Structure formats: structure tokens, C-alpha cells
Image (spheres, rainbow, N blue to C red):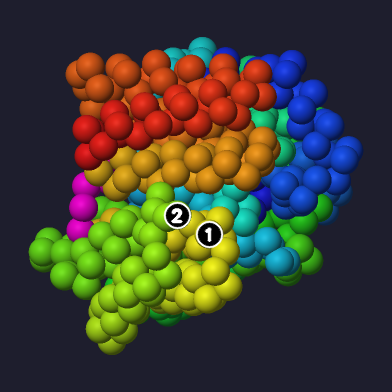
Amino acid sequence: MRATFGSSGVPHPAKALLGVGLAAALMASACSGSSGTTTAQDTARSVTPTSPSSSDPPASRRVDLTEPTFSDPTTITNPLFPKVVGSQVIQLGAEGEEQLRFEVTTLPDTKTIEWNGQQIETRVDHFMAYGDGRILEVAVDFYAQADDGAVWYFGEDVYNYKQGVVHDNEGTWLAGKDGPPGMIMPGDPSVGDVYRPENIPGLVFEEVTVQAQDEPLVGPQGPISGLLIQERLMDGTLEDKVFAPGYGEFRAQVKTLDELYNLAVAVPRDSQQARMPRELSVLWRNASDLVGREGSSPRQVSSTLDTMTRSWASYRSGDVPPLLETQMSDALQALDAAVGRARPAGAQQAAIDAAQAALDLQLPYRTLSDVDVERLALWAHQLDLDAATGYLAGVAGDTATLQAIWDRIDHTVAGAKAKAVTTQLGELQARVDAADLAGAADVTAALQNNLAALG
């Protein structure tokens, strides 16, 4: 597991192949110092081969030394590490100046892994990481719950991105092939417990010590109790993590890297049975109306922005998940500033960001598949914007993001339109591999029509 990323898509290995034309174009762009090339940090940090320290804890503190048995491994009900099919967690934070976003989705997929003479069926998690709004990582994680309630980690397939394309697969490992599975959450943890979620000789070593329990914390819907606080040592780096009942990983901090992220919202944990508030409908409708409307008059744009601002002021006067409140407020401020500078590309980017923030607020009121289809449509608009500005790395990353989101929801849709989306994503990847921005934009226009039919 990544030292700080909160794990887990089912990326297609074929998508990891980088076309020669795209590779050459990206290299040229990087060498020329073009202003259209992002300078965001690399993706997941490299996993440095290491070994357990010489000061290993005594066996009496280890709670992962008994071989687990698995009768119903894909039913993961551990309250501190729940994995419910169809659930999604949004985590927000920063590493230094880079803004981080993680989306963790539990899929209906399972994977059978052979370990120690057993065939263990594992639950599949889909993880996506973004840095400053651009794709950093896609990973697939494999978990199984033992009969005593402990959750075990059976490995991960990792795709690390740089300049919008797969840079490496560092961090990938599989139990039975590379080493043993690791306990990631005990069934009944206590202060002082020690366990190793990852212990792959020559690849990765991670050790956890439970520091405290039951300290209060404020979550998306108010105070939370029954927390578990850990100290993690991973490849020489110390990390503090907090797990919350019903949520799982809630907070993580690496002080030496100036990294901190928190859970912003989770469904179904934070799902609301009530009808979606009118203000959220207005926010989303107006933000999405601004997307793709470069030709709108300044008066029209200002009027739409005023409507959004009033709706947001009304809605935020109630109870709003704190991190989502900050995200929406920042997005509206950025949109206001972009409109004031009369820069169409900047205003379009701000409108896309505001629409994404509005979708996060709507997530507790809508089905996850509906929200993800809307996200796909916004990423298609992002691709249009990046193509129009000649940003090849951006278009490559947008294509990877579209494919990854589609991979996690394609099981929820069917029919000719769904097949068309799959075909068009393949065509889009071919255009990107050929560094054909105009062709990519043409495919995206057809893709947007099919996505609209799915919504």
C-alpha cells in the first residue's frame, strides 16, 4: 500500500502502453519548456527496497503471526475497514503546495489469489489519485476478511502517471507470488498492537503500531467516536493515520513531507434519504451550463455566477461537510476571479472545477453511477479545453482519467450507448497515442453525445 495514498479501478493493462508519437511529442514539449506543460510533482513516490529494522517489536505485541482462515473473505464488515460494494470515499488534502484528491471505490469484482495452498477470493478496491486536478495514480487493491474479523491485504496493481501517461508500475505486488499477505486491520484492535500490512522482502516493508483509541473527531455529518489512531513506518517514513467506524481510513499525515489529507465525504455512509436541496440543484445546473459556453456574453456569465453565489450562501448556512464547503467556496472564488479577468480559457477551467465541486456535494443524494457519468462528461469537457489550448499532456491525462472512471462504472450500464462509449474511449486513446489533438477533440464530441444519453 502506498505510504500516504489511501488505496485502489480496474485499469486495462493495454492502456499502459504509450504510443511512439505521443512519447516523442511529450518529450519535445518537456524539453522546450512550453508553458502548456504541467510541472506537477511526480506520481506516487517510489517504493524503496528495505527490510525490517533491527529493533523489531517482541512477538507478544504482534497480532498478525497466526495464519488466518477465510470462510467468507469477500464480505468485509470490519467497522474500521469496511468494504461495501458500490461505496465510494472522497479524500482531500495537500502535499506541500500540491492539492491532492483521492477517490476510493469498492467494486463488485473479485479476484482469486493462490496463497499457501489456498484459493482466496478477494474483494477489489479501485483507487484514483489526482494532484492539482491531474491524474497521478490508478490502482487496484485486493482485500479479504478472515474469520476472526481481521482484514488482510493481498496486494495491488499500480499504474503511476507522469505527464498524463503511465510512467511505471512501482508498488505492484501480489500475495503468493511476491510474498505473504499482510494484516491491514485487526478484528479487535487494542493500543500497543503491532502488525504489518506489507512485508515483501526487497520491495516494501510497512509496520503499524496502534497508538490510541476512542478519541473524538469531527466528520462530514458531525462528531465521530470509536477512532483508531496508528503510527505507520513505511520504508523509513513515519505516518500518522486515523481510522473511523463506518468510514475506514479517515485522516493521514506525513509531517516530513508536509502531507495531510482527510476524508471529505463517503457513500453510503453519508447518504441522505431526503430530497436533494434546491440550492444544490441550482449550483450544479448553473455550473454545468457555464461549461462549454465560451461564447457567452460577460453579462450572461456574471448573471449565472450571481445565481450560484446566492444559492451557495443559502445552502452553506446549514450543515455542510467541512472540506466540501471549503472546496465549493474556493471554486466559486476562482470562477469569479477568472470571469473578472475576462480570460475565456481560465473561466472554462474554473467552471469545470466548480461543477466538480457541486457533484461532490450532490453525491449523498444521488446514485454513485449517475454522479460518475456526470464526472465523465466534465472530464470530456476538460479534454476539449486542453485540446483547444494545445496541452498534449493534459489531453493524455484526461483520456486516462476517462478510461479509469469508465472502468469502475461500466458494470452499471448496458446497451448500445454503453458499447459505443467503450469503443470511443479506445478510439480516443489511439488519437492521443498519435498526438492527434484535433482527432481527439472530434472523438470527444461524439463521446459527449453518448454520455448525455446515459445520464
Quadrant assignment, res 16: top right
**Residue at the spot of label 1:** 344
Q: Where is residue 432 in the image (x, y as percent from the top left)?
A: 60, 24
Q: Is 427 left or right of 223, judged from the image as shown?
A: right
- Residue 377 makes an appearance in the image: yes
- Closer-to-camera residue (79/253): 253
Magenta span: 365-369
The reply to whether the C-beta atoms of the residues labelled 1 and 2 are less than 8 Å apart is yes
Farthest bottom residue in view: 317
Q: Position of residue 236 (x, y in %)?
A: 81, 52
> The C terminus is located in which quarter?
top left
**Residue at the spot of label 2:** 294
Label located before the other in sequence (1 or 2) = 2
Please state which amino acid type lies under the numbered disc 1.
Answer: Pro
Q: Per the image, is 54 magenta?
A: no
Q: Is 447 left or right of 398, judged from the image as shown?
A: left
Please report the residue visible at 34 percent of the width from the left and 68 percent of the height from the top. 300
Give the Cα separation between the discs numbered 1 and 2: 6 Å
Q: Is 422 left or right of 51, judged from the image as shown?
A: left
Please state which amino acid type lies under the numbered disc 2.
Answer: Glu
Q: Position of residue 153 (x, y in %)?
A: 52, 36
